[in-house]
Amino acid sequence: MKQHNTEALRQQDAAHHLHPFSDMQSLNQQGARVITHADGIYLWDSEGNKIIDGMAGLWCVNIGYGRKDLPEVAKKQMEELAYYNTFFKTTHPAVVELSTLLNEVAPQGFSHVFYTNSGSESVDTMMRMVRRYWDVQGKPQKKTLIGRWNGYHGSTIGGASLGGMTYMHEQGDLPIPGVVHVEQPWWYKHGKDMTPDEFGLQAARWVEEKILEIGADKVAAFVGEPIQGAGGVIIPPATYWPEVERICRKYDVLLVADEVICGFGRTGEWFGHQTLGFRPDIFTTAKGLSSGYLPIGAVFVGDRVAEGLLAGGDFNHGFTYSGHPVAAAVAQANVRALRDEGIVERVKNETGPYMQKRWRETFGNFAHVDDIRGVGLIQAFTLVKDRSKRELFPDWGEMGMKCRDIFFRNNLIMRACGDHIVSAPPLVISKEEIDKMLDVAARCVETFEKEVLF
Ligand SMILES: Cc1ncc(COP(=O)(O)O)c(CNc2cccc(C(=O)O)c2)c1O
């Protein structure tokens, strides 16, 4: 294994590299952790530590690290055709084959995909697409998009506006006009004395109220993650999405699922909307499409919208690397493997149910852990002050960071979203590896409760 000079790398990194979502001052004081290679569900850092990656990178390495086939596919494609665009009446075999495969794994009625380089670009593409769709329908005033507070849809001006993270809106004078938000379907905080099912209908009614407030004739789409990821794995009650779909149909508002995290097997189905029981008009993807081996995103366009768009002639939108040959070839091999190696199937029938059972067993008896939840291989719990009253800690996020740091020190990567502790490991995780991950996690939470709370 190649040796690395951690100190030298840290200094050069501090001198030249601006990290995303980071306070560079504090990062440079402690120095970044240098990840040098990975295999399966494991990472290794430059100090030789072996780390369990309970987050699949950033929710994206669905196929697991260290595949030998994907680099081979990339090499072959790069030697054959490293790049050509799909703009001016041209295409190439890699993007045609990927599009055909995606049509096979997508639900019925999603015959067309539009390619991007990231989840944010998929979201921005969708935003322009839905507005263009209504233009072509002769309803150009239907251009407002509704998102949710604490939803996450990326970091571009469109995606960050549609997302409901106010700390992002404060930087860059967001949201842009024509984007509004409703409260998120977080029963634990907003459900008061309603049952989850009653609250799901209430939260859906917030969407109807917003549509009526704006005027249905001005609303283009409602956009949501089937399960909010970066917002803390907020799983809506079962009644929420079917009711939101009914409302969108009633007012002829397009329904968009942002599947960047939930897509490609994360929830046990190919796409999260299938698990949560609704049918969108469009859905956005990235991450698991290539398992992070190369950057690529795709917008799955439902037939109604695709026909509406095609009727309008040129859709003046796209990127230099839309459908990039090497990214497309790797994505195709990745999706084929997720399907043909039965990985999605196993999440649904074996490792997903096993994780959900063990996750609840592991964290069920801690005094300050509540709302233990998850489906497939996306799960979370919330650190709370008083379980009996569903009372959260006062300084939201402080406890989450302390707990996350204990995981980090114990070579386990889990994510703190506020005081939610979340996990989304590679979909190839085995039952034995789930046990191992949860043994470490349990010890860390014990330490957290002893050291931090008492
Ligand atoms: C639902 C959703 N939509 C869009 C994006 C944007 O994708 P790109 O990053 O590829 O532009 C995301 C991305 N989600 C994301 C990205 C980076 C960090 C974290 C975190 O939870 O810390 C989450 C996402 O989760």
Image (tube, grey):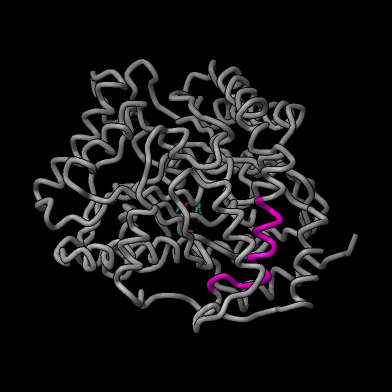
Asked if residue 160 shows in the view, the reply is no
The residue furthest right is 1
State the quadrant of the N terminus: bottom right
What residue lies at 77% left-to-right and 27% top-to-bottom?
432
Determine the image quadrant of residue 438.
top right
The residue closer to the viewer here, 45 or 116, is 116
Going by the image, does 424 lie left or right of 274?
A: right
Residue 99 in the image: x percent, y percent? Answer: 57, 60
Q: Foreground residue, 375 or 243?
A: 243
Q: Main secondary structure of the magenta part?
A: helix
Left/right placement of residue 137 relative to residue 8 reads: left
Is 252 situated left or right of 384 in this image?
A: left
- Magenta region includes residue 94: no
Image point (88%, 64%), residue name:
3
Across and down, in percent, residue 189 comes to 30, 30
Q: Position of residue 254 (x, y in %)?
A: 27, 51
Q: Compared to 226, does 121 lie above or below?
A: below
Q: Residue furthest bottom?
A: 88
Q: Residue at the location (45% across, 51% down)?
A: 110
Up-down relation of residue 184 to residue 448 (above or below): below
Q: Nearer the viewer, residue 241 or 448?
A: 241
Relative to 282, 71 lies left or right:
right
Q: Is residue 328 magenta?
A: yes
Locate residue 82: give its quadrant.
bottom right
**Residue range (magenta):** 322-335
Is 363 rendered above or below residue 294? above
Is 135 above or below relative to 251?
Answer: below
